[in-house]
Amino acid sequence: MRTHGWGGQVPVNDEEAVARILAAARETIDREGAGTGLADVARTLGVTRQTVYRYFRSTDELLSATAIDAVGALLDRVESRLRGISTADAAVVEGLAAVLEELADDNYVGLLLRAERLSVPVVGDFTSELGRSLAHSMVERMDVAWSATGYGPAEIDDVIEFVLRTLQSMILDPGTPPRSGDDLRRFLDRWAGAAIRALPQSAPAGKLSTH
C-alpha cells in the first residue's frame, strides 16, 4: 500500500482502495463520459497511474469493474418499473424493454455497451456465469408466481436463457433505427413473450415444480 497520494487519506486496506477507485471512476465517467481512461481516474483520485494499475491492469478492466459495481442500482430501477406486473410473459417483455431503456442512459453499465466501446467479448460475457447470475436476480425480482403458474427450475433456466440471448442480440444489433416505446415492446412480445408463454405447455410431464 502506498503511503502518499490519495488526497492525503491513504486507504486502510486493499478493499477500501478498490472501493475508492471505483467511486473515482464513477465521478470521472460522469465528467468525461465514454472517453474516460485509467489516467483520468488516477488524477481524480490524486494518485499515480501505477497506483491504479496495482488494482486494475487496464482501462477496460476498471470500467468493467465499475459496471459490475453499478449493476445492483440498475436492477433496482428495473424492478421499480416491473412492480405489479404478475404475468410471466408481460413481466419478461417489460423487463427486457426496461433494461434496454435503462442501459441507453446508464453511465456505468451502459457505457460498456455503447458503440465506441462495444466488443464481441463484452457482449459474449452476457451468457457467462456472471451474466446468468444477474439475469436470475432480475427474474427473481419480478412479481410473478413462477412455480404456481407452471414454471419449474428447468423452465426458469430457459427464461433466463431467453432474457440473456435477447439482450445480447438487441445490444449487438439494435436495428436501424432502433426500436423504442410500444414498437419495441410489440417486437419483444412476438419474440421473447411468445417463447415464455409456450414454456409451461412444452415442458415434459413431471418436470414442473410442485412447490
Image: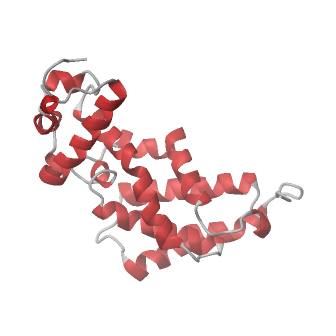
| Residue 177 percent location from the top left of the image | 29, 72
Side of 88 where 55 appears, left or right:
left
Side of 143 where 20 appears, left or right:
left
| Residue 168 percent location from the top left of the image | 44, 53
Quadrant that contains the C terminus: bottom right
In the image, residue 184 sits, relative to residue 33, either above or below, namely below
- The foreground one among 59 and 50 is 50
In the picture as drawn, the residue positioned furthest to the bottom comes out as 182
Total labels drawn: 0
| Residue 203 percent location from the top left of the image | 79, 60
Q: What is the basis of the colouring in this image?
A: secondary structure
Which image quarter: residue 207?
bottom right
Side of 2 where 40 appears, left or right:
left
- The foreground one among 85 and 171 is 85
Quadrant that contains the N terminus: top left
Which image quarter: residue 151?
bottom right
Side of 129 where 170 appears, left or right:
left
| Residue 56 percent location from the top left of the image | 28, 28
- The foreground one among 106 and 208 is 106
Identity of the residue drawn at 39% across and 44% down: 68
Q: Is residue 128 visible?
A: no
- The foreground one among 47 and 134 is 47
Q: Is residue 136 visible?
A: yes
In the image, residue 94 sits, relative to residue 74, either above or below, namely below
Identity of the residue drawn at 52% across and 72% down: 82
